[in-house]
Amino acid sequence: MAEKTLTDWDAGLFDCFEEVNTCCYGFWCGPCLACTVSGRFGENNCLPLCDIFGSAALAACGIPLCVPPAVLSVRAAMRNRYGIKGSLCKDIAVSCFCASCSWCQMHRELKHRKKTPTVINIENNTVYNMQPIPVAQPPVVMASAQPPAAGFVA
């Protein structure tokens, strides 16, 4: 397998004010932003709701949940798919302490990846015409091989 070069995130974790729309979306409706990111990444739109309802259900049973599973799994998958630098330990730390900032960062990354132009390199190739050149031919007159019958004037 060829090793691909790793890149940085398009925006930093706390670069929320680089794109104010995403920042406001994450602040005023964090679960909506998380569901949007999950859906655009190709996962189930409702996956981030596991972080909200799963943590609440486990806490009600007396089991604390430190790492939100949805933000961690989407973040690790995004780093893997796009070849972004980082480690699972950093993903866990970010998911535990800065989940909303992580969703905003992933949203900005997906927007950046969506508008990155595709470069098509067209070389100057010689085109050969494979059809023969049309040639005008003189009209052909069909003549009878037999002489005309007697009494018939042509």
Image (cartoon, rainbow, N blue to C red):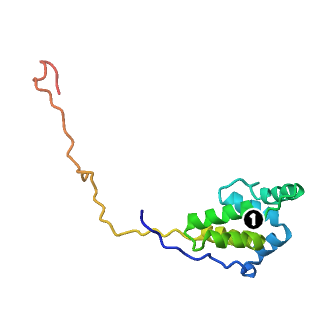
In the picture, the quarter occupied by the N terminus is bottom left
In depth, the one of 30 and 88 nearer the eye is 88
Q: In this view, does 75 lie to the left or right of 142?
A: right
In depth, the one of 25 and 76 nearer the eye is 76
- Which residue is depicted at the point 86% across and 70% down? 28
Residue, far right: 60
Q: Is residue 135 left or right of residue 148?
A: right
Instruction: Give the vertical position of 133 relative to 71 (above or below).
Output: above
Location of residue 94 by image quarter: bottom right
Q: How many labels does the image show?
A: 1
Mark 1 neighbour class, 10 Å CA radius: few under 14, some 14 to 19, many 20 or more: some
Q: Is residue 63 left or right of residue 16?
A: right
Place of residue 8 in the rendered image (x, y in percent of width and height, measured from the top left): 58, 77
Instruction: Give the vertical position of 18 relative to 67 (above or below).
Output: below
* Amino acid beneath label 1: Val
- Which residue is depicted at the point 60% across and 69% down? 113
Place of residue 92 in the rendered image (x, y in percent of width and height, measured from the top left): 69, 69
Is residue 98 visible in the rendered image? The answer is: no
Instruction: Give the vertical position of 139 relative to 108 (above or below).
Output: above
In the picture, the quarter occupied by the C terminus is top left
Write down the residue under mark 1: 67
